[in-house]
Amino acid sequence: MAILLSAVIVAGSILYGSSDLGARLRDLRTSPPVTAVSPAPSPIAAPTTPSAAQLNETDANQKVDVALGAYPVLGKKDAKVTIVEFSDLECPFCEKFDTETFPQLKKEYIDTGKVRFAYRHYILPFHSNAPKAAEAVACANGQGKSWELIEAIFSDQKNITVADLKKKAAAAGLNATRFDRCLDSGEKKSEVDQDQSEGTKAGVTGTPTFFINGKRLVGAQPFSQFQAAIERELAN
C-alpha cells in the first residue's frame, strides 16, 4: 500500500508539473518579448556649412553695413561701388583671387574710378602663420606700405613665417628696425582682432568674402562674377 500510494503521488506530481510547464510555455509564446536595452534615438544630422554658391544665391539682394577698416582704400572716394574684402593671408583661395582676378578688377574698375576697394583681415583658425602675417600688414600700414606687403605675401605665400615677413618688409622698402619692433611686440594684434570681430558680425564664415555695396559674394570667384555684380550696382 505504501509503495502504491507513493507511485500515485509521484504520478500526480509529474502530471501537475507537465501541466504547469505547458502553461508556462504557452505564456512565453503569447507574451510580448522583453527588450534588454532601450533603442538608441535616431542620430541627428550634423549641421552643414552652406556652399559659396548657396550663400551667394541667398544673399544676392541682402545688404550688410560693412566699414572700410584701417587700411588705405584703393580707388576714388566718390566711386559708385564699394567692395570690402575679408581675407586670410595664408588662404590659398585668397591668393587665387589676388593673383588671378584682382589685377583685372583693378584695371577695369578701380583705376577707372568706378569702384573703390578695401582690404580687411579674417583669420581662419587652422592657418598658423596668418595672425602674424596680418599684424605685419598692420605694421607696414604705419609706414604707408600695407598694399605693398599684401602683394609681397600673396606672391610668395608659402614663405610667411615671422622671419620671412621681416625679409619681405625690408625688400618692400620699410624701415626694418621700426617694422621688426612693431611685429615682435604684437602691438597691432588688437587691430587685427577688430577686423575679425566685425567680419563675424557681418556674417563672414570663410575667406575670401566680399561685400559689394554691402551685398555678399563668397569665394575666389572668376572676374565675370565680380563684373556682373558691379554692373548691376552701376546700373542702379
Image (cartoon, grey):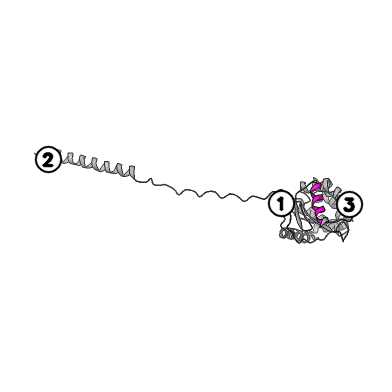
Q: Nearer the viewer, residue 159 or 200?
A: 200
Tell me how far mark 3 sits from mark 1, CA to CA: 43 Å
Residue 205 is one of the magenta-drawn residues: no
Counting every numbered tag in the picture gives 3
In percent of width and height, residue 19 lies at 23, 42
Can you tell which of label 2 and label 1 is closer to the viewer?
Answer: 1
Using residue 114 as the reference point, say whether residue 43 is left or right of it.
left
Q: Nearer the viewer, residue 20 or 123?
A: 20
Residue 226 is one of the magenta-drawn residues: yes
User: Which type of secondary structure does the marked residue at label 1 adopt?
Assistant: helix
* Residue identifier under label 1: 57
Can you tell which of label 3 and label 1 is closer to the viewer?
Answer: 1
* Residue identifier under label 2: 5
The residue segment tinted magenta is: 222-234
Residue at position x 31%, y 44% in the image: 27
Using residue 36 as the reference point, say whether residue 52 is left or right of it.
right
Question: For the residue carrying disc 3, how many other residues have a C-alpha within 10 Å: few (<14), some (14-19), or many (20+)?
Answer: some
Question: For the residue carrying disc 2, how many other residues have a C-alpha within 10 Å: few (<14), some (14-19), or many (20+)?
Answer: few
Residue at position x 29%, y 43% in the image: 24
Q: Nearer the viewer, residue 220 or 16?
A: 220
* Residue 20 lies in quadrant: top left
* Residue identifier under label 3: 170
